[in-house]
Amino acid sequence: MHIPDGYLAPAFSVGMGVVTVPSWVIATRRVRKVLNQRTVPLLAIFAAFTFTIMMFNVPVPGGTTAHGVGGTLVAIVLGPAAAVIVVSTALIIQALFFGDGGILAIFANCFNMGVVLPLVGYYTYRLLAGRAPLLSTRRVWAAGIAAYIGISVSALLVGMELGLQPMLFNVDGRPLYSPYGLTVAVPAMLVAHVFGASIVEAIIAALGFAYLQQHHPEYLSSLRSTVAGAEVTTGQARPRPVWQLVGAGVVALVVLLGVAGLVSGGGDMGHAFGADWSSVDWGSVGTMLIVVAVLAAVLVPLAWFLLPRSIRGVGTAYVAIAVLTPFGLIAPGFAYGEGKPEDLQQEFGYVPEGLQSLSGFFSAPFKEYNLPLPFFRADDAPMWHTAIGYEIAGLLGMLLLGALVWAFGMLMLRPGRTEVQESRGAVSG
């Protein structure tokens, strides 16, 4: 869903700022109500979380790839205003440093994923959860369903924005920017998410919420009046080991995506999700998986022993996810609406003039989540080289984003306010 430069007309892209910038201003003012010595680190942790989740691509129907965002979970825990700031900051960093999403398209991408997604997800969650206790199973289901709806609505908006370009900006009927019309872009985005990325988003939200219920209920109860409503009770969660939660999430993800892949591939595993898996060099994939496994065996335990106790569990989990992100490199094809000019040339036989001129508007230093060194970027570099660069870039991105959000939060933190005062302020606000 990261729209690159060239797919939207400059006037359209900048025009999206009319709704995005005021959303940022309102969110910044409101997020100060929940800022204290506990929530500032949480903002940084969840910013790193959304960044990592968006790096993890999965195959989806249509022969393309897509990813989750995690915005609904952030909104449920910290409130929608905080989610707008967190996800938008992650998207801006991705565009500036990693070339994921265009510079001119920042307003559009932040509106779709950083404003609409968490707001729709949050209020859907509130509707579904009702007055159920914070630690009830009903809220786990509500979180998952809300996340599914939130990212699906966001995907619908992306499809509409891409689909409007040929209607609004063309020369003699030939599109200047996105070549996909509404009748193509909207169904493609919805199918890719409703039967793919939205499932991932739902499982992430449900699993993350269940984990917090079991092991860190204080993160849910401390902001109860702001996020869930003052009348909501805390309740009691039934304890489950972490491995059971993770195992259930992985099994659900594999089964649901597997069914979607088989159905969209007509029952042929060689064309699961509508992609041609015969084009994949499985020898290179095998080598990459071995390298990734070795790195995971070294880096994950190392993170556990080196990180401070206060962030050991979360930090180790993030390192594990970052190490595993190269799995997304296996899937053939590219994310819908994010193809390079040469991809469009192959698909349509031409490249829209405006798209061609804007596609090289900005070159990020760590473009495509890789390091600017021949070892990682050379045309003949094996997949495992790319995988290592991808992992390092991901870890750097998490650290950079976490540090920036923490610094931003500390700057906004009102001097002299304690957690108790902050909680009372949130209730009265």
Image (tube, grey):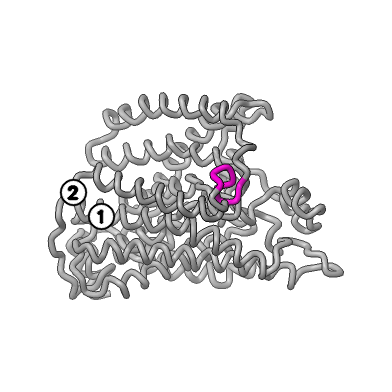
Picture residue at 49% right of the left edge, 59% below the top: 195
Asked whether 100 or 331 is in front, the reply is: 331
Q: Where is residue 4 in the image (x, y as percent from the top left)?
A: 64, 54
Lateral position of residue 5 relative to residue 34, left or right: right
Picture residue at 78% right of the left edge, 55% below the top: 348
Residue ranking furthest to the front: 267
Asked whether 406 or 375 is in front, the reply is: 375
Lateral position of residue 116 relative to residue 310, left or right: right
Question: Which residues make up the magenta segment?
Answer: 268-275
Asked where in the image residue 70 lies, by quadrant, the reply is: bottom left
By secondary structure, the bulk of the magenta-drawn segment is best described as helix
Residue count near mark 2 (Cα–Cα under 10 Å), binned few <14, some 14–19, many ≥20? few
Asked where in the image residue 429 lies, by quadrant, the reply is: bottom left
Q: Do the residues labelled 2 and 1 touch (CB within 8 Å)?
A: yes
Viewer can see residue 13: no
Q: Position of residue 81 (x, y in %)?
A: 38, 66
Which of marks 1 and 2 precedes in the sequence?
1
Residue ranking furthest to the left: 236
Residue count near mark 1 (Cα–Cα under 10 Å), binned few <14, some 14–19, many ≥20? many
Picture residue at 56% right of the left edge, 57% below the top: 1
The residue to which callout 1 is attached is: 210
Position of residue 339 relative to residue 158, above or below, is: above
Picture residue at 67% right of the left edge, 26% below the top: 380
Asked whether 116 or 296 is in front, the reply is: 296
Identify which amino acid the numbered label 1 is placed on.
Answer: Ala
Q: Is residue 272 magenta?
A: yes
The residue to which callout 2 is attached is: 240
Identify which amino acid the numbered label 2 is placed on.
Answer: Arg
